Image (cartoon, rainbow, N blue to C red):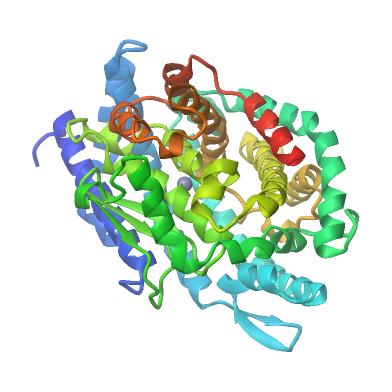
């Protein structure tokens, strides 16, 4: 076997990542019944073993601080550790996918529904009693089978990372690898929850009473699903207008949404296709899939815009960059572009131009959107605080479900269930990438407004500028570096709070 070098690691690492991504795309888009990941891991064992880890560790430790070599080695090392940790739990992941796709829940002896459809059925239930009954049945299955599977995965992955002894514990390891402080972000989250408490307490009772006819004391997470289903505005967002609207938006922005054929929109109805949309960068930038199973309504628009942001980011990345700058790095950046686009659903001018909303209903839509944004942000802040508790090792596993219920219910005002404590948890602190992406999108939007005016989204000078100055950079920069370059500002929740205040005012 030839010795492992940086060049070989990049070449085979890219081949491995492409195969994993292609398998995921084929399975989740319904082209294949299941994703067979194990054979791919086996085939690429050479870049997923001790040698590869040692090589990236050496590169990381020997590169001078804040040099380009250090940046590149940091991304490669993080990827190595994530891939190897994922390999250690791949069998559990396969079991989870198999369980989820076959599990059926019995709703009060009256009817059976697939476990995976529970959230959709809860959101669409006609009566509250039915919504709560489905959630009760779902929680029983979650507590008996899904939760324990996930707990085992979390414990195994945590042990694997800690045994590497890169730093003193799981959280410091993550911080060393990514160069950002989770604990600082946690403090910002606590402050955000406290600072927006009065605004939340003023707003929540109104929407609960008006939309669901309940009081804050009764509200559960199942009610939240129904409340944010947003059915009342679906008429202004017909499925038939979805793709034409987004294409018109892209063409006015002077961006080819298909990137000359590199990006494929997979919007067709297909048996076995996930209900959840996703973007699969199978080869970056040459082959990117945007996958959505449209149902009609507000959610389709938000999701298509989100995935379009990812697709443009990957589809326009500079092909000359090494593997780690096109594929790896700080995912707050790609999520930031996705959120930059999905936040157009909170822009009055964009909504009036590209959707069926008119001047009479756009104000009410914006108020509801701001309320939802505040809920979502408070939920994610609470999630990160809870996840920090999970990985701190200071709280025992059997107490964590209570901490989960208390933290999430406290921040959102909706009562959470302990059965979800290990299911509603993003592996490897992905919630922190979302939170930083949220902060990043508000800075990017502001810089686009400064450069191209309020209606930057239809300015034909803006698109080419974004391609050249933003997307082409791939993920070489971190989110704070990009924020600084785009606007000279640091990431923070402040602009988000101000945007929500404006939105709630209508
Ligand atoms: Zn995303």
Residue 338, quarter of the rendered image: top left
Left or right of 457, for residue 71: left
Q: Position of residue 434 (x, y in %)?
A: 54, 39
Taking 124 as reference, is 202 above or below it? above
Q: What residue is shown at x 12% (from left), y 34% (from top)?
A: 3
Q: Which quadrant is the N terminus positioned in?
A: top left
Left or right of 131, for residue 327: left
Q: Position of residue 69 (x, y in %)?
A: 27, 18
**Between 312 and 452, the one nearer to me in the picture:** 452
Q: What residue is shown at x 82% (from left), y 64% (from top)?
A: 212
Left or right of 98, for residue 121: right
Q: What residue is shown at x 57% (from left), y 59% (from top)?
A: 298
**Between 336 and 422, the one nearer to me in the picture:** 336
Q: What residue is shown at x 61% (from left), y 24% (from top)?
A: 492
Q: Which quadrant is the C terminus positioned in?
A: top right
Q: Position of residue 6 (x, y in %)?
A: 18, 29
Q: Position of residue 405 (x, y in %)?
A: 77, 50
Left or right of 387, for residue 257: left
Tell me, yes or no, if residue 181 can be seen here: yes
Tell me, yes or no, if residue 37 can be seen here: no
């Amino acid at each position: 076997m030839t010795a492992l070098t940086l060049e070989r690691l990049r070449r085979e690492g890219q081949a491995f990542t492409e195969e994993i991504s292609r398998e995921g795309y084929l399975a989740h888009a319904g082209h294949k019944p299941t994703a067979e990941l194990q054979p791919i891991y086996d085939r690429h064992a050479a870049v997923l073993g001790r040698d590869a880890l040692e090589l990236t560790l050496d590169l990381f430790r020997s590169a001078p601080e804040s040099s380009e070599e250090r940046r590149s080695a940091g991304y490669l090392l993080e990827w190595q550790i994530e891939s190897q940790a994922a390999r250690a739990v791949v069998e559990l992941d396969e079991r989870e996918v198999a369980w989820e796709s076959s599990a059926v829940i019995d709703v009060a002896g009256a009817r059976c529904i697939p476990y995976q459809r529970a959230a959709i059925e809860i959101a669409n239930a006609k009566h509250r009693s039915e919504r709560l009954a489905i959630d009760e049945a779902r929680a029983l299955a979650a507590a008996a089978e899904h939760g324990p599977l996930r707990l085992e995965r979390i414990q195994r992955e945590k042990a694997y990372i800690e045994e590497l002894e890169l730093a003193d514990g799981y959280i410091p390891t993550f911080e060393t690898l990514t160069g950002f402080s989770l604990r600082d972000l946690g403090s910002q989250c606590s402050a955000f929850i406290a600072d927006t408490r009065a605004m939340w307490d003023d707003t929540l009772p109104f929407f609960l009473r008006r939309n669901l006819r309940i009081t804050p004391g009764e509200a559960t997470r199942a009610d939240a699903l129904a409340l944010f289903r947003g059915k009342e505005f679906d008429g202004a967002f017909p499925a038939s207008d979805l793709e034409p609207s987004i294409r018109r938006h892209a063409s006015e922005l002077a961006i080819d949404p298909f990137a000359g054929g590199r990006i494929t929109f997979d919007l067709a109805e297909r048996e076995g296709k996930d209900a959840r949309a996703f973007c699969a960068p199978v080869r970056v930038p040459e082959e990117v899939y945007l996958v959505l199973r449209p149902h009609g309504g507000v959610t389709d628009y938000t999701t298509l815009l989100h995935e379009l942001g990812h697709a443009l980011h990957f589809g326009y990345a500079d092909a000359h960059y090494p593997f780690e700058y096109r594929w790896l790095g700080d995912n707050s950046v790609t999520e930031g572009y996705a959120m930059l686009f999905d936040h157009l659903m909170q822009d009055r001018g964009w909504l009036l131009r590209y959707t069926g909303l008119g001047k009479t209903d756009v104000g009410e839509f914006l108020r509801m959107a701001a309320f939802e944004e505040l809920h979502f942000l408070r939920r994610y802040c609470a999630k990160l605080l809870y996840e920090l508790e999970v990985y701190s090792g200071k709280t025992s596993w059997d107490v964590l479900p209570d901490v989960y219920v208390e933290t999430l219910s406290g921040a959102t005002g909706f009562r959470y269930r302990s059965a979800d404590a290990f299911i509603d948890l993003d592996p490897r602190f992905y919630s922190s990438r979302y939170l930083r992406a949220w902060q990043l999108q508000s800075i990017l939007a502001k810089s686009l407004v400064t450069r191209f005016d309020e209606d930057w989204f239809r300015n034909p000078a803006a698109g080419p500028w974004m391609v050249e100055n933003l997307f082409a950079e791939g993920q070489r920069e971190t989110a704070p570096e990009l924020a600084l370059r785009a606007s000279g500002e640091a990431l923070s929740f402040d602009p988000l709070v101000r945007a929500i205040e404006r939105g709630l005012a209508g």
